[in-house]
Image (cartoon, rainbow, N blue to C red):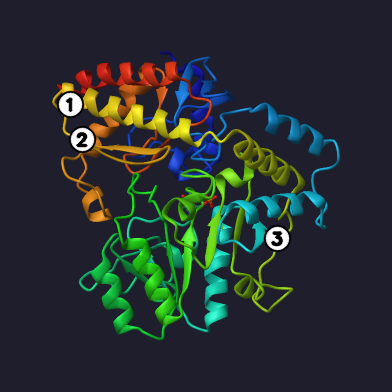
């Protein structure tokens, strides 16, 4: 597979943008080598600037659940463009998207539209603090909530209760109000709330982790967060930026039957355009300005194009209910990849919920960041490149979930499994 033009374009990009990219996740840091430069997407496929075609299991890191260039989304965008692209004033489409979110996401009574998942989580934790009058936010190691300063915090040593910055530029002062706990660890939660009964404003978490590879919650974990938030008056913030409209129409909260106080959304809610949202209990959302005093704003928030793509995507999901097919396709893929690895004598385990899947190069269950950190990432890198050579575009890191879309066919899944059989034999050596 020749990628001469891709190489040329990226060589130029490296002079123009830090690391040649506008977001590090796409830089191939986790697998080595250069990112591929793309020209277009159609259905389940991506085509690079050299004309090579790949079956796409990234879907722009989640949003493209309907596949690329879905006719409904395309038409909605064309119609919106013809009416003007931004007014900085109320529009009817904002109501349309808000109504769909409120209808579909069980716990959301009121919603505010923003421009990214990061803005959604940043605003939700500010609201939790403003609402409770408390400072501390709890997060879990290996969960990612965007590049919000106070959430770019890693577990401290020893007690793992005091956060330390994990990026230069995040001040110790900011980090100290974030407490980091191990995911899926019920005792750690018990202990923390017992030690800080009146200080915790909110607990933010991924209900199914996508950002350390796909790691489902263990039975009782989400329930325990709910129980402690109720008991101690903390705000439960379910970060459904990735899982929202992905693991079920109503997200993880519908799948697991747990109602958070606030929910953050992104990715699918904008159908491939930049958007995010946060919403939840009306009595909490009522504290957001101008209804209340917690400040949050945005020049482009509720943008006509983004809301048009979001409405078209959610409406199509509602009309077509692709979830059973997404589940069965991804289950087939999970079984096929696992069998391919086993045939080559390579130990792997999987994490999967609906159409989110990770094949971990590890021989024990992955339930937390400490488990995930033990994976053979070098082997993952080799597997990734062998799959690229066979026209399969997987996440460029062991620590990202792959996404199956409604556009993937039986033949796409079968082709991917065949490619994996060859790839596993190739990396066995
Ligand atoms: N929360 C979660 C769970 C995410 O996966 C992401 C992005 N991958 C974010 C928040 C941040 O969203 P964005 O990149 O749109 O800022």
Q: In terms of secondary structure, where does tag 1 sit?
A: helix
Is disc 3 surrounded by few (<14), some (14 to 19) or many (20+) residues within 10 Å? few
Residue 320, image x and y in percent?
60, 33
Question: Mark 1 or 3 closer to N-term?
Answer: 3
Is disc 1 surrounded by few (<14), some (14 to 19) or many (20+) residues within 10 Å? some
Q: What is the total number of numbered labels drawn onto the structure image?
A: 3
Q: Nearer the viewer, residue 377 or 103?
A: 103
Q: Would residue 278 be found to the left or right of residue 309 on screen?
A: left
Q: Which residue lies under the disc numbered 2?
A: 348
Q: Nearer the viewer, residue 131 or 36?
A: 131
Q: Which residue lies under the disc numbered 1?
A: 342
The answer to whether the residue labelled 3 contacts the one labelled 2, judged by CB atoms less than 8 Å apart, is no
C-alpha distance separating marks 2 and 1: 8 Å
* Res. 115 visible in picture: no
Q: In terms of secondary structure, where does tag 3 sit?
A: loop
The residue at the point 55 percent across, 72 percent down is 126
The residue at the point 75 percent across, 35 percent down is 76
Q: Nearer the viewer, residue 221 or 185?
A: 221
* Quarter-of-image position of residue 220: bottom left
The answer to whether the residue labelled 2 contacts the one labelled 1, judged by CB atoms less than 8 Å apart, is yes
* Res. 125 visible in picture: yes
Residue 298, image x and y in percent?
70, 60
C-alpha distance separating marks 3 and 2: 44 Å
Q: Which residue lies under the disc numbered 3?
A: 298
Q: Which mark is residue 215?
A: none
Residue 312, image x and y in percent?
69, 38
Name the front one of labels 3 and 2: 2
């Amino acid at each position: 597979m020749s990628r001469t033009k891709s190489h040329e374009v990226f060589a130029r990009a490296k002079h123009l943008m830090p690391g040649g990219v506008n977001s590090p996740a796409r830089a191939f840091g986790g697998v080595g080598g250069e990112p591929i430069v793309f020209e277009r997407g159609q259905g389940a496929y991506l085509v690079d600037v050299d004309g090579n075609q790949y079956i796409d299991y990234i879907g722009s890191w989640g949003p493209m659940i309907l596949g690329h260039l879905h006719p409904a989304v395309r038409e909605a965008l064309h119609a919106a463009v013809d009416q003007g692209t931004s007014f900085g004033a109320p529009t009817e489409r904002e109501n349309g998207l808000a109504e769909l979110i409120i209808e579909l996401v069980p716990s959301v009574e009121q919603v505010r539209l923003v421009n990214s998942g990061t803005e959604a989580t940043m605003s939700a934790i500010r609201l939790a603090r403003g609402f409770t009058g408390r400072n501390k936010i709890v997060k879990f190691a290996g969960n990612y909530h965007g590049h919000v300063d106070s959430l770019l915090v890693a577990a401290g040593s020893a007690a793992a209760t005091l956060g330390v910055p994990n990026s230069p530029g995040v001040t110790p002062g900011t980090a100290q109000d974030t407490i980091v706990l191990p995911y899926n660890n019920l005792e750690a939660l018990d202990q923390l709330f017992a030690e800080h009964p009146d200080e915790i404003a909110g607990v933010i978490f991924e209900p199914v982790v996508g950002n350390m590879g796909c790691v489902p919650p263990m039975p009782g974990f989400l329930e325990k967060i709910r129980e402690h938030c109720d008991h101690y008056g903390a705000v439960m913030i379910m970060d459904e930026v990735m899982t929202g409209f992905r693991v079920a129409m109503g997200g993880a909260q519908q799948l697991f039957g747990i109602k958070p106080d606030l929910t953050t959304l992104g990715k699918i809610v904008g159908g491939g355009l930049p958007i995010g949202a946060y919403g939840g209990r009306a009595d909490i959302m009522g504290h957001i300005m101008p209804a209340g005093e917690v400040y949050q704003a945005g020049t482009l928030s509720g943008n006509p194009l983004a809301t048009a793509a979001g409405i078209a995507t959610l409406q199509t999901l509602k009309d077509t209910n692709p979830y059973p097919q997404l589940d069965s396709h991804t289950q087939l893929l999970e079984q096929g990849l696992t069998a391919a690895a086993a045939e080559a004598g390579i130990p792997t385990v999987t994490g999967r919920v609906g159409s989110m899947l990770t094949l971990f190069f590890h021989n024990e269950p992955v339930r937390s960041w400490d488990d995930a950190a033990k994976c053979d990432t070098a082997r993952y890198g080799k597997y990734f490149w062998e799959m690229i050579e066979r026209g399969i575009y997987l996440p460029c890191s062991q620590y990202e979930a792959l996404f199956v879309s409604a556009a993937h066919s039986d033949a796409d899944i079968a082709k991917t499994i065949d490619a994996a059989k060859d790839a596993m034999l190739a990396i066995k050596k």
